[in-house]
Amino acid sequence: MPAPEDADNELNELRRRLGAELRRVRVQAGKTTREMGGFSSTHVSLGENGKASVSEDFIAEYVRIGGDRVRLLSMLDDVKRASDQERRRKRQKESTQAATIDPRTLTPDSDFHELRRLYQSEELDDHYLIGPNKAVLRATHIVRVRPLTPYSRYYVCSYGSAERGSKGVLTLQPGQGCELARLTETEKGTLHFVLDFNPTGGDVTNLCEFTFAIDFHADEPMIRKPILRNSTRSGIRRVVKRVQFTEPALPSRIWWFQDIELLETEDEPRPGRILPLNPSNFYFRDFTDLVDEYVGLGWDWQ
């Protein structure tokens, strides 16, 4: 196994080579960073400098302007391989750190940061139901975590509503695969809770999957240009955002975003990110291979 610094150097070098090739393709095609559809100029610049994640959708923009698809995807596969190795190294480091804590001594009342060190979030699948008055009725979440010790069991979360900051607006409903272990609520209605995804307290080593739902008890409509957004800075690899609209509260257009900077998620959407409207009024986007990004869906009301 390569030393940690060697693995870092290999990943950085592969990202740099891919970025340099992407820049060469763009410059040869006579395009500016602002002319690469579907991605912000900042994202393009960071990707070409090897400082941002590059997806197949990102590569497709360069193939569209003349890039060699086979060559670019092969280089991307090399980056993904090295990135997977880096994630495994990071997971091993986290496991080593977690091993310094005896999880059997922790309780739901333990410090959130201590509890959080005992698992790695792998995937998050969010489903939002929008009612006829343009208000969120329920948000259902499917979570997949990887325990870092055999007796890891507590998942921590804070959940708030920026538009409805008062007590009693949100209620938590634990779902399949977990039990509620702790719940507090602030004066502004933010829920801080702990879910037990290993209620028997037995030995767990595989990926754990569980669900929970948040019910919204307010009639105020969402703002004119709503955004459903996640940050992946905690190392989560996959996020799925789904939203079901109820007539007559329908979008006039809906789009996805995947940006490095928080403020970029509130920019006017690029044409390549617009999702086609459909009669089911259900929309989703699956984001994979994420690294330190903001992802989600946004829309305008009819």
Image (cartoon, rainbow, N blue to C red):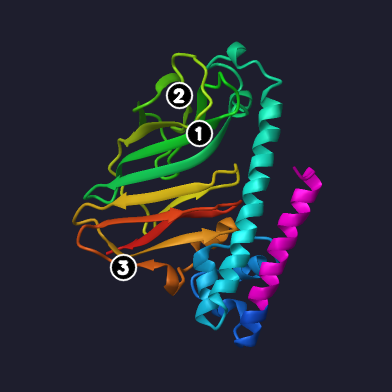
**In the image, is residue 105 part of the stretch drawn in magenta?**
no
Q: Residues within 10 Å of mark 3 (few under 14, many from 20)?
A: few
Q: Which residue is mark 3?
A: 276
In what quadrant of the picture does the C terminus appear? Answer: bottom left
- Residue type at mark 3 is Pro
Amino acid identity at mark 1: Val
Q: Earlier in the sequence, mark 3 or mark 1?
A: 1
* Residue identifier under label 1: 145
- Which stretch did the figure color magenta? 1-23
Sequence-wise first label, 2 or 3: 2
Disc marking residue 197: 2
Which residue is at the far front?
A: 1
Give the label, 2 or 3, closer to the camera.
2
Instruction: Report the Cα–Cα distance between label 2 and label 1.
Output: 9 Å
Marks 2 and 3, how far apart at CA: 37 Å
Q: At x 49% / y 14%, what residue is drawn?
A: 201
Residue 173 at x, y percent in the picture: 34, 27
Please indicate, yes or no, whether residue 159 appears anywhere in the rendered image: no
Q: At which x and y percent is residue 105?
A: 61, 11
Please tell me whether the stretch drawn in magenta is mainly helix, strand or loop. Answer: helix
Q: Secondary structure at mark 2?
A: loop
**68 or 190: which is nearer to us?**
68
Mark identifier at residue 156: none
Horizontal side, residue 179 vs residue 146: left or right: left
Name the N-terminal-most of marks 2 and 1: 1
Horizontal side of residue 214 vs 79, given as left or right: left
Vertical relation: 81 (above or below) 119: below
> What's the residue type where badge 2 is placed?
Phe
Residue at image position (42%, 49%) is: 240
Please, is residue 56 above or below residue 166 in the view?
below
Mark 3 against mark 1, which lies toward the viewer? 1
The residue that appears at 60% across and 17% down in the rendered structure is 103
